[in-house]
Image (cartoon, rainbow, N blue to C red):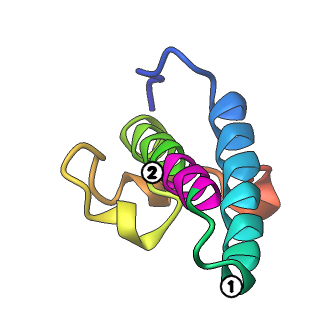
Amino acid sequence: MKNYSSKSREMLLKTINEVSFAVDDIKLYLDTHPEDEKALAYYRDKVMVRNEALKEYASCFGPLTIDTADDNCSRSWEWVMQPWPWEGGC
């Protein structure tokens, strides 16, 4: 598959991993501090960044998650042609 992204596959994966960690971490904090508006704004911002990165990754390299698998901008079912995790795909 061609890379249509201005970012490399590795950079997108790094961004997705970092932002996913931040989202998971802030969700734990919000479980005990649900009225912290600053934390809620941070959470919403990171979710938006994560979703955009997942969408960009899906359009360039194929979906990483089921919620991006049916995205119109990804090339349907070409993900099966990507390297599998044991082949260095992750």
> Dot 2, crowdedness within 10 Å: few (<14), some or many (≥20)?
some
Badge 2 amino acid: Asn
Q: Secondary structure at mark 1?
A: helix
Residue 9 visible at all: yes
Residue 89 visible at all: no
State the CA–CA distance, disc 2 to disc 1: 21 Å
The answer to whether 76 is drawn above or below residue 4 in the figure is: below
Who's the residue at 42% across and 37% down the image?
Answer: 56
Q: What number is the disc on residue 51?
A: 2
Residue at the extreme left = 72
Please state which of residues 61 and 57 is positioned toward the viewer in this rendering: 57
User: Magenta residues: mostly which secondary structure?
Assistant: helix
Who's the residue at 68% across and 85% down the image?
Answer: 31
- Residue 67, position in %: x, y? 37, 69
Q: Quadrant of residue 14?
A: top right
Badge 1 amino acid: Asp
Q: Judge whether residue 55 is colored magenta.
A: no
Q: Which region shows up in magenta? A: 38-47
Q: Secondary structure at mark 2?
A: helix
- Residue 66, position in %: x, y? 42, 72
The answer to whether 83 is drawn above or below residue 1 in the figure is: below
Please state which of residues 14 and 83 is positioned toward the viewer in this rendering: 14
- Residue 21, position in %: x, y? 76, 59
Q: Quadrant of residue 22?
A: bottom right
> Dot 1, crowdedness within 10 Å: few (<14), some or many (≥20)?
few
Who's the residue at 33% across and 60% down the image?
Answer: 77
Q: What number is the disc on residue 31?
A: 1
